[in-house]
Amino acid sequence: MVDAGNTAYVLGCAALVMLMTPGLAFFYGGMVRAKSVLNMMMMSLVSLGVIGLVWVTFGFSLAFGNSHAGLIGGFEFTGLTQTQAVAGDIPVQAFAMFQLMFAVITGALLSGAIADRARFWPWTLFVALWTVVVYVPLAHWIFAFDGAVSEKGGWLANTLGTLDFAGGTAVEINSGASALALALVLGRRRGWPREPMRPHNLPAVLLGAGLLWFGWFGFNAGSALAAGATAANAFVTTMTAAAASVMAWLALEHRLDGRPTSLGGASAAIAGLVGITPACGYVDTWGALAIGVLAGVICQLAIRLKYRLGYDDSLDVVAIHGVGGLVGTLMLGFVATASVNDAGADGLLYGGGLGQLGKQALAVVVSLAWAFVLSALLAWIVKRTVGFRASAEVEFEGIDEAEHSESAYEFSTAVRAAGRASGGGLLGATRPPEYRADPADTEEVR
């Protein structure tokens, strides 16, 4: 029987998670240069459109339909026309919309790895294919529980016994590994890391981080699918981990760089929220505190590592979402406690032994390998067929004008005319003296 209170709760949480995608658009848009902010934000907006259509038509059915060998669902819910079907005590349609918002934000996250250099329609094609090939199977493996929506669910949750309350594997590790694959296939931004590529609007970054933090309560607490004690615990642990991450990150940043920064604070909040996502319904406050501190420290160090390794993950999707998700998923093997949720298990520090840690580690390896290999293959196919990366000229002048025939900020006619006369970009800037065409700069990467 449908419970009206729980249905209203899940629908409200779905709306909160939906708000995370516009929040991500502000977060990412503020971090890029002014000449590509619209393209950056549009990649989030179009994810709502294209993933929404994929999900409603057949994506949800493949993710949550009756499982075939624990690997993929069936076609029982195509079109979401089953108005009387229930998932526990809420309508399947309500559950489907809640899960849709997870799929959308996960796909949109990938765009941060290829900021300033990706063409719009090839991105749209890629994220549609990626949702079907990469996200849907992972979601089935970890989110589809036996008897919840269908009789049989995915193998990670039901056969292996992996704990993942709200998406450490299917959302966070998946997005981090996929983002790394994208960044490697498309290559570095021209001029990186030689030229500074600073955020153009830090207030927008802080606004976006605030919207993400706000929506994350729906993301994590909503995953209880009922307004009760488990949801309340998820809310508390989510807040605790994010707060701990902010303080740990800023303290380390001050120690290493001499100042705590607004960009660091915004990134720290996201790192803590990512870290607690798989664990929020299975740990107590002290476990959340430990996860938040570790996420704040380890994710910041991972950002610094990318300059040593030389991969251009523009907006640090790998370091924050991939590494943060890995921290939270593995920490469940240490700090999970069945005392807060009898559907969970005890980790090593609560007397549970090493068994759960091994299950968590295997889920991490499977998620990383699946997401990285298939995302790299899809990105390579799009690159070789329709062309994924903008040309050198477009990248220098700004993707907004080339891809959308718009600019985020309207300047005076005189300034624009001066810019055209000087052969420069939006503000009349000419190419820097050290700018020289090389093979990577003179052809559109296909």
Image (cartoon, rainbow, N blue to C red):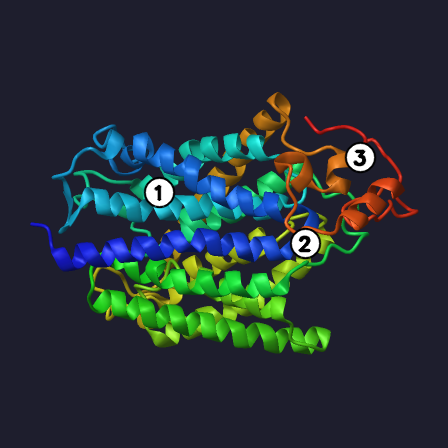
Frontmost residue, 438 versus 298: 438
Residue type at tag 1: Ala
Label 1, label 3: how far apart the Cα atoms are: 38 Å
Give the answer, above or below, for where 127 lies relative to 325.
above
Where disc 2 sits, the SS reads helix
Which residue in the structure is indicated by mark 2? 306
Where disc 3 sits, the SS reads loop
What is the quadrant of residue 350 in the picture?
Answer: bottom left
Q: Is residue 66 left or right of residue 443?
A: left
Frontmost residue, 9 versus 307: 9
Q: What is the crowding at mark 3: few (fewer than 14 residues within 10 Å), some, or many (at least 20)?
A: some
The reply to whether dot 3 and dot 2 touch (C-beta < 8 Å) is no
Question: Looking at the image, is mark 2 or mark 1 earlier in the sequence?
Answer: 1
Which residue in the structure is indicated by mark 1? 139
Residue occupying image coordinates x 69% and y 39%: 187
Which residue in the structure is indicated by mark 3? 441
